[in-house]
Amino acid sequence: MGEGQARRITTLHSQRNLDFPESPAADVTTALERNGLAVQVLNVPRDLRELANRLQEKPPELVFNLVEPTSGHPTLPQDVAATLELLQFSYTGAGPAGLHMTSDPELSRRVLAARGVSVVAGSDDPEGTDISVGLLGNEVLEVFPSHEAGSELLPGHITPFVGAREEKDRIARIVFDALRFRDYGLLVLRLTPSGALWVVRAFPNPSLGRDGALARAAERAGWSYDSIILRVLEEGLGRTGVPSVLYPQLF
């Protein structure tokens, strides 16, 4: 790449009938462009061979994989990740193995139980408060302050962990590694009256939109929206051999 030439990034999404300016893909694209990156936006075509052709026409340095399941293709995220792997494109977020595990609740439960983590299974589960926990990074993993699940848009709903804070961080690290998260994620944990923590849900590629639970959790910890997106970018580019700290003034 010549000096001064913008890095080529593709944002890949599956929001076919959504007004683009209001979508997470638009939020991510705007943040990347605001920081000097050249961004191509692609909607996943129904035929993944067409996706391969379109990516190979203008190969990006990194694909921001924002693909979500659709009503007609519930395994679309896994299939797209597998396609990107096959084509040897670097991309953000979890790979096929992590996406497959988290799409199968019983498999996820068994994997986590083998590592000593309690998982809510739908019967004889403890009562408590469900708490959203945002995750960002890989080797250095940011575990953001927690808030009641479903209250992302409401102020003043911070749930203190008191003595469970270290346990929250420990469980977050175990889940992140065991379920093969990458770059970012979101957990819903249940905090019981006794202070025990159970895993309710694990999302390897949660929404990266400005109003998503992950962005809200990170912003509560003092991160700007752009810094969140650029951290994900750094983590993804780091797998390509590009120096990891591209925008030190933002961190």
Image (tube, rainbow, N blue to C red):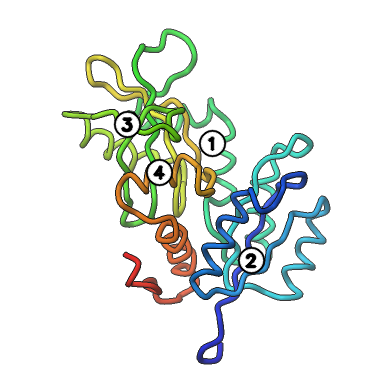
Q: Residue at x 77, y 67 (%)?
A: 54
Mark 4 surroundings: few (<14), some (14-19) or many (≥20) residues within 10 A: many
Outermost top residue: 124
From the image, state whether disc 2 or disc 1 is nearer to you: 2
Mark 3 surroundings: few (<14), some (14-19) or many (≥20) residues within 10 A: few
Nearest the viewer among 95 and 233 is 233
Q: Which residue is mark 3?
A: 156
**Label drawn at residue 10:** 2
**Which amino acid lies under the numbered mark 2 shown in the image of this protein?**
Thr
Q: Label 1 to label 3, Cα distance in Å?
A: 30 Å
Outermost left residue: 163
Q: Label 2 to label 1, Cα distance in Å?
A: 25 Å
Q: Which residue is mark 1?
A: 102
Q: Residue at x 47, y 67 (%)?
A: 239
**Which amino acid lies under the numbered mark 1 shown in the image of this protein?**
Thr
Q: Quadrant of residue 68?
A: top right
Report whether 54 appears left or right of 251: right
**Which amino acid lies under the numbered mark 3 shown in the image of this protein?**
Gly
Dot placed on the residue nearer the N-terminal end, 1 or 3: 1
- On the image, the x and y values in percent for residue 221 come to 30, 47
Q: Which residue is mark 4?
A: 176
Dot placed on the residue nearer the N-terminal end, 3 or 4: 3
Nearest the viewer among 84 and 17 is 17
- On the image, the x and y values in percent for residue 45 come to 80, 54
